[in-house]
Amino acid sequence: MFIRKAPTRNKSDGEAYFTFRLVRAERTGKKVRQLTLLNLGRQFDLPPADWPRLCDRIEALLCGQGGMLPVPEAIEVLAQRYYARLVEGGTGPAAAEPAPPAGQPAPSASKPQPAAPDADFAEVDIASLQLIQPRSVGVEAAGLAAIGWLGIDPILAELGFNGIQRAAAAGSLIGRMAAPGSELATWRWLAERSALGELLGVNFDTTSPMQLYRASDLLVKHRDKIETMLFTNIQDLFGLAVTVTLYDLTNTYFEGTAAGNEKAARGRSKEKRADCPLVTLGLVLDGSGFVRRSKMFAGNVAEGTTLAGMLKGLTAPKGALVIMDAGIATAANIAWLKAQDYRYLVVSRERGRQFDPDQAIDTLTASNETVQLQRVLNEDGTEVRLYCHSTGRDTKETAITGRFVTRFETGLAKLAAGLDKPRAQKKMADIQQRIGRLKEKSRGIGQHYEITVTPDAAGKNAAAITWTKTPVEGSMLTHPGVYCLRSSETTWDAAKLWHTYTMLTDLEAVFRGLKSDLGLHPVFHHNERRTEGHLFITVLAYQLVQTIRHKLKAAGETMSWARLREILSVQQRVTATFRQRDRRTLHVRKTTAAEPALRRIYDTLGIDAAPGGVRKFTM
């Protein structure tokens, strides 16, 4: 075995260059011919002095030998890579033995069984068995199936993506599903831990991270067309009727200053990362939970200014119902929705709380918690308000206000007690300032107190501090657990309005999934285009996850993606090597058997339980 440097020429532009090949000499009778085992490409930069050591190490691996002398790491990495490619290519896939039908016991090991018609026997030394090159394959198989169901590959081909770019895009999406991280982390996962390259017929270990970045740039460039075509395919796949549109925003933070990104800005972080610049992601979802539109905004964007920009040009039919929270439901946005003939169901921005339990009805949440609903139609009959009282929310808000009440009154008592101490602050201006600071930290509790500071005879120092608690009507203190919804659906009853609104909690779950399961944060890119690519890849990966979960849910499986990923990630592809009696070495690359939980998922989704098949190579 040796490496040959061969001159060649590009047929399209006439460029002359060298390519490198792994070659083996074979004698046939009196003739010797050279057989190319592997094309190493034109970017093979190992020094010629190390070529013999690389070939020796590849031959040792093919013969199942550990090697007598230590090998430099650079040579060992290349040897393992080329060995894996030789075994993956093999002599062609062999048929795998089918599993017994569900419910039928496997053949007994104690009773001899007749050989299958396509059985392939070899006499091997059991002690020589080695299991090498483990690579994950479960999430990869499910992700590729979802890409096929949604027709993503034809979409990208229609938009001008070539084969390498489509493979890089698939690698980025499935990498985000399986091992969320930066594009660089995804590239390492593809090259070192995943069998996705085998399933796609692509050698990710020879690609560069730049190919993933360029694929990201192309995805962003065609974002609108991809989202439109993809959602159309989703509608066709699941037979969805577009009647509800959910809209909300979240933000994610950067690692570093992101000085080169104009949209990176300080704002109110949903993850409490006020120390980092932020970028905002807006999502428009269908009621089934699939993304229809996504867009990146600046980190300090005002939520209420984004609605029209996201919904304009949307293919939602006239009269579609838009559901959104209070941050977006400004008076201007509601007026715009009316003018565009959209219906709406929003969380009201009105500050004063009100609720009459005598006019309310009860309904149950999915967790059997009671919610009281009071439906009030406005005077001209064009809008309905739904005042809601949640027991769970009441308990939470009562605990919050109770904590701040205790903290505020403790602070006032400490100030009052200090007036009798010789070194404590007593000046009227200082006492008023400290009371102001207490109010500032009280989260609005200070508005419920009338505080009187009595000066001494000279009028310079405070002689006493007294206070009276006078709760402001319509506040969290007097109406804990109460919130209000507004809607144009004046014919709906209270229960239908409330249960439709709960779809907005599904959107919150989507954001949690994007962040915790699919690596939306943090963002490591400082370039605006690459940042947008990172967010868009996460959104597309969510579409794949939602497709898988939607299919499973139809069959009664309601597991989270985190749990599904745990089950899928157990399955690996490994290479088993044996030394045969004839002194040759047999290499068999095969996928581990699917365990019961994994088999059930595969069967439900209609996926082959042994992705990648079986490949055999003898040396």
Image (cartoon, rainbow, N blue to C red):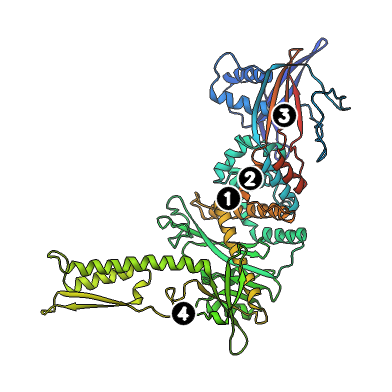
Label 3: few (<14), some or many (≥20) within 10 Å? many
Q: Nearer the viewer, mark 1 or mark 3?
A: 1
- Give the spatial CA distance, label 1 vs label 3: 31 Å
Q: CA distance from mark 1 to mark 2?
A: 9 Å
User: Can residue 391 be seen in the rendering of this structure?
Assistant: yes
Kind of residue indicated by mark 2: Arg
What residue type is disc 4 on? Gly
Q: Which mark is residue 565?
A: 2
Q: Secondary structure at mark 4?
A: loop
- 1 vs 4, front mark: 4
Report how many numbered discs are placed on residues in the image.
4
Nearer the N terminus, badge 3 or badge 4? 4
Q: Amino acid at mark 1?
A: Asp
Residue under label 1:
517
In this figure, which residue is indicated by the disc labeled 4? 352
Marks 2/3: CA–CA distance = 23 Å
Q: In this image, 170 relative to 334: left or right? A: right
Is 21 in front, or is 65? Answer: 65
Contact check, label 1 and label 3, Cβ < 8 Å: no
Looking at this rendering, what residue extends furthest in the front direction? 358
Tell which of 189 and 343 is nearer to you: 343
Q: Are marks 3 and 4 in contact (CB under 8 Å)?
A: no
Q: Marks 4 and 2: in contact by CB < 8 Å?
A: no
